[in-house]
């Protein structure tokens, strides 16, 4: 999973709730059925896991963050949550479906993750997911690169925790892992960031740890301000920042 990312469950739920809102569309694609065994991979604080459970499925949440899992267990004590690394995991049971929302772009070993998912599924099992695709938050990332290079002499690429594949690249990865790809959508989804003038700062505090682990509090604040100023030229509209999100949404099957 992503290096040096520190997850903050309460801030995630309050400031990044758009991930949950948009994730409900992915649940519709999953179409969970009563009694199905479903794994929610990268479940975070468990909000979408609970939505799947509400459909009558026997759902288990998996995440690599102890902090997120602690919050998930507190929120939904009747749902089992387990710790696991998406890049390499094994399960004692086989699932009818694996679901993942807004998580797999934090997993740089896509091949390892897909082989693990394939192994966790029953023959005929479904894999339904959405995550960042090629060009996702490119304006924010270019602002990060500019500030790190110009002000601190740091190559941002060496600290980049994200994996944003093209549709063709990910379809090929799915097929190499053994999946049959039933559907793949790639689309722009401009996303309003919480915080008004501080929208980029709020976003960086939640998702940008990997770039700034060795920064002092003062240096981090200064870098965030500069990044926000640069990004404003392209991402500020009316009264808010809008993240330039691009998403991949996929539905695949493990053949019988």
Image (cartoon, grey):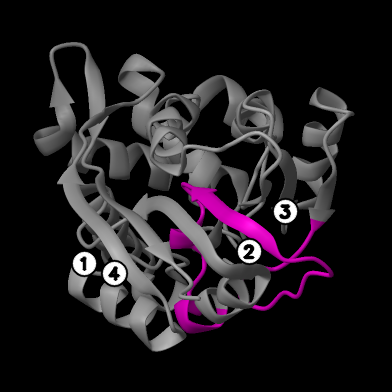
- Front position in the image: 18 or 184: 184
- 3D distance between C-alphas at marks 4 and 3: 23 Å
Quick one: SS at disc 1? Answer: helix
Q: CA distance from mark 1 to mark 4?
A: 6 Å
Identify the mark nearer the N-term, 3 or 1. Answer: 3
Among the two numbered marks 2 and 3 on one chain, the one whose residue lies closer to the N terminus: 2
Residue contact at pointers 2 and 1, CB within 8 angstroms:
no
Numbered circle sitting on residue 167: 1
Residue 62 disc label: 3
The percent coordinates of residue 157 (x first, y second) are 35, 74
C-beta proximity under 8 Å, tags 1 and 4 = yes
Q: Is residue 66 left or right of residue 245?
A: right
Residue at image point 26% right, 53% down = 136
Q: Image check: 236 left or right of 90?
A: left
Tell me what residue is drawn at x 21 percent, y 67 percent: 167
Disc 2 to disc 3, how far (Cα)? Answer: 19 Å
Q: Residue 12 in the image: x percent, y percent?
A: 59, 31
Q: Which mark is residue 4?
A: 2
Instruction: Look at the image and say whether residue 98 sits in the magenta stretch.
Output: yes
Q: Position of residue 174 (x, y in %)?
A: 38, 76
Q: Quadrant of residue 206?
A: top right
Decide which of 5, 127 is in the foreground and name it: 127
């Amino acid at each position: 999973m992503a290096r040096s990312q520190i997850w903050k469950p309460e801030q995630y739920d309050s400031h990044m709730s758009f991930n949950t809102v948009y994730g409900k569309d992915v649940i519709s694609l999953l179409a969970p059925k009563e009694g199905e065994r479903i794994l929610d991979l990268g479940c975070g604080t468990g909000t979408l896991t609970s939505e799947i459970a509400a459909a009558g499925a026997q759902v288990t949440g998996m995440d690599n963050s102890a902090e997120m899992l602690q919050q998930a267990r507190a929120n939904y004590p009747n749902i089992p949550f387990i710790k696991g690394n998406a890049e390499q995991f094994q399960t004692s049971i086989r699932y009818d479906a694996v679901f993942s929302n807004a998580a797999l772009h934090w997993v740089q070993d896509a091949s390892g993750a897909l082989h693990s998912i394939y192994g966790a599924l029953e023959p005929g099992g479904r894999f339904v997911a959405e995550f960042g695709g090629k060009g996702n938050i490119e304006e924010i990332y270019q602002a990060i690169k500019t500030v790190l290079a110009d002000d601190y002499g740091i190559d941002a690429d060496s600290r980049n925790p994200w994996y944003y594949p093209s549709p063709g690249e990910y379809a090929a990865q799915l097929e190499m892992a053994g999946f049959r790809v039933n559907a793949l959508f790639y689309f722009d989804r401009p996303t309003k960031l919480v915080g008004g003038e501080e929208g980029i700062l709020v976003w960086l505090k939640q998702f940008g740890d990997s770039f700034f682990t060795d920064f002092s509090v003062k240096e981090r604040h200064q870098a965030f301000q500069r990044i926000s100023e640069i990004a404003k030229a392209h991402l500020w509209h009316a009264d808010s920042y809008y993240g330039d999100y691009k998403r991949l949404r996929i539905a695949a099957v493990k053949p019988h």
